[in-house]
Image (cartoon, rainbow, N blue to C red):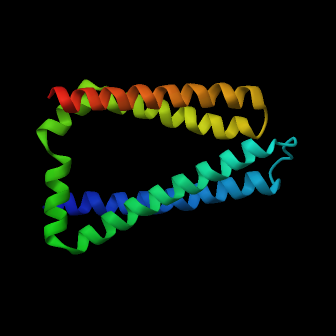
Amino acid sequence: MEKFRAKIQKRVMILSLTVIFIAAVYLLLISGLIMETPSIPDFIKGFNMGAFVGVELILVFFTVKYFFSMKNEGAIKKLYIEENDERSKLILEKTGAVGMLLFILLCAIGTIVAGFFNKTVFYTLLGVTALGAIIRGASKLYYHKKL
């Protein structure tokens, strides 16, 4: 269990650094200190702000969850069982979860970055990201019921 605790501690550190990094990059982009961005439509500004806040909240949620689970033996055992459940692993394998999640994340990042420069590319990547998320969600639902 100590190996798992060390793994969780490393996750907390990585998540904390990611929160800080994403906030710094976003603030630099909207401030215009690095480069001047063209005028952006309000919808894209709102989308970027919403995506930023959403990602930050999710990262903070998991950071807090892992941080407090390290202090409670029962919680860390529950987390260990949750992460090493064979049925969950099979579902992840069947849905191609890792590759699909990476694809969706990269498209989402591309969508946010494109929003600062070109609205046509922004809308295209937004559609691709949404379609990828729908396919992943449908696959996950299918295999949760099938397995």
Relative height, residue 29 to residue 110 (above, below): below
Q: Nearer the viewer, residue 35 or 44?
A: 44
Quarter occupied by the C terminus: top left
- Measuring from the top left, give residue 35's x and y in whole percent: 83, 47
Asked whether, in this view, residue 79 is left or right of residue 108, the answer is left
Choose top left, top right, bottom left or bottom right for residue 11: bottom left
For this rendering, which residue is in front, 70 or 45? 45
- Name the residue located 45 percent from the left edge and 32 percent from the top edge: 133
- Image coordinates for residue 124, horizontal then vertical, percent: 66, 24
Residue 33, percent from left and from top: 82, 56
Residue at position x 38%, y 29% from top?
136
**Residue ID at (65%, 59%):** 24
Pick out the residue farthest to the bottom: 71
Residue 94 vs 48, above or below: the answer is above
Q: Quadrant of the N terminus?
A: bottom left
- Quarter location, residue 145: top left
Toward the viewer: 9 or 63?
A: 63
- Residue 79 is left or right of residue 40, and the answer is left
Residue drawn at x 33%, y 65% is 65
What is the x, y in percent for residue 9?
A: 31, 64
Counting the numbered discs, the total is 0
